[in-house]
Amino acid sequence: MIEAGLVVEGGGMRGVYTAGVLDYFMEKNLYFDDCYGVSAGACHISSYVSKQIGRSIKVTLDYINDKRYCSVNSLIKTGDMFGVEMLYDLIPNKLELYDYDTFNKFKGNFYSVVTNCKTGKAEYIKIKDMKKDIIAVRASSSLPLLSRIVEINGKEYLDGGITDSIPIKKSIKDGHKKNVVILTRDKTYRKSKPKFLSLLKFKYKKYPNLVKAIENRYKIYNETLDFLEEEKAKNKVFIIQPKLPVKISRIEKDKDKLKELYDQGYEDAKELYEDLMKFLEE
């Protein structure tokens, strides 16, 4: 177990890049004492802490074209583009069994980042029991307009990426002097102002703080990217990210493109492994 923070951003189906990186980490038995996952990043960390190599990409490729997994049909029928029953019950409990016992033996901590709809602030829910706490992973992955609001202990939540897409400052606040960050965009990427803002304001008119957070997300995201570069220059952060712009969407269904991006993540982790270990050992 490495005494460092592992920070993983989301990005919908772009998260298969992260799945490739984490599979290589698992092959090397490389685990971190604190893991922070956002949206798809939280989903992939789930298989990482249960030490199930290949599970994330297998689930993606096997079920991506199943209407119950991700479809407009699911959005119309349930209010969720990504089917809740399929992703958080049928797959882990019947179709592609999740190793709950191994998860329970994990000595580190796993935090799922969510956005409180009332306050418009990020919260970091510790996943102690995956069977009970998987709802926090779901909340972290619940995209505005494409998902229902998720209620946990009387509080309402949506996508953690709205308020803290790359929770590096949370990891530093928790005491980590070294952090490994997995991004799903290349170095040239910068986030733009949100689209459909009028629709978002109408949809979430009861949640003004949430709307404000969505409106300002691009600013916070870009500031975080600048902060990461500063930390990298100080040798406090090690970044793994795609070398070229990623050409797939959040809801990409092309299996060849998804597998190619997964392979890229795996190969990037392999290529950077020696440098990563030097960074962690210094």
Image: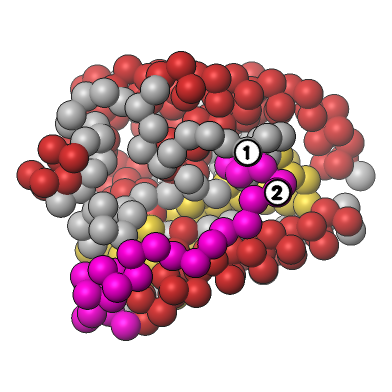
Q: Which residue is mark 1?
A: 245
139 relative position to 245: left or right: left
* 253 left or right of 237 in image: left
Residue 211, how many percent across, how many down? Answer: 35, 76
Q: Which range is magenta? A: 184-208
Mark 2 / mark 1, whichever is N-terminal: 2
Q: Secondary structure at mark 2?
A: loop
Q: Position of residue 195 (x, y in %)?
A: 39, 63
Q: Which numbered marker is on residue 271?
A: none
Question: What amino acid is found at the position of numbered circle 1 in the picture?
Answer: Pro
Q: Determine which quarter of the picture holds residue 250.
A: top left
Where disc 1 sits, the SS reads: loop
* Residue 136 counted in the magenta span: no
Distance in Å between CA atoms under marks 2 and 1: 8 Å
Viewer-nearest residue: 134 or 21: 21
| Vertical placement of residue 70 versus 52, above or below | below
Which of the pair 109/212 is nearer the observer? 212
> Residue drawn at (48%, 34%), measured in percent from left and top?
248
* Quarter of the image that includes the N terminus: top right
Q: Is residue 46 above or below residue 178?
A: above
The quarter of the picture where residue 229 lies is bottom right
* Residue occupying image coordinates x 58% and y 70%: 220
Work out whether residue 232 or residue 77 is closer to the camera in this orientation and state it: 77
Q: Are marks 2 and 1 in contact (CB under 8 Å)?
A: yes
**Residue 20, percent across and down?**
58, 26
Q: Is residue 198 left or right of residue 30?
A: left
Q: Is residue 77 left or right of residue 26?
A: left
Query: For mark 1, does the 10 Å Cα neighbourhood hold few (<14), some (14 to 19), or many (20 or more) residues?
Result: few
Residue annotated with mark 2 = 188
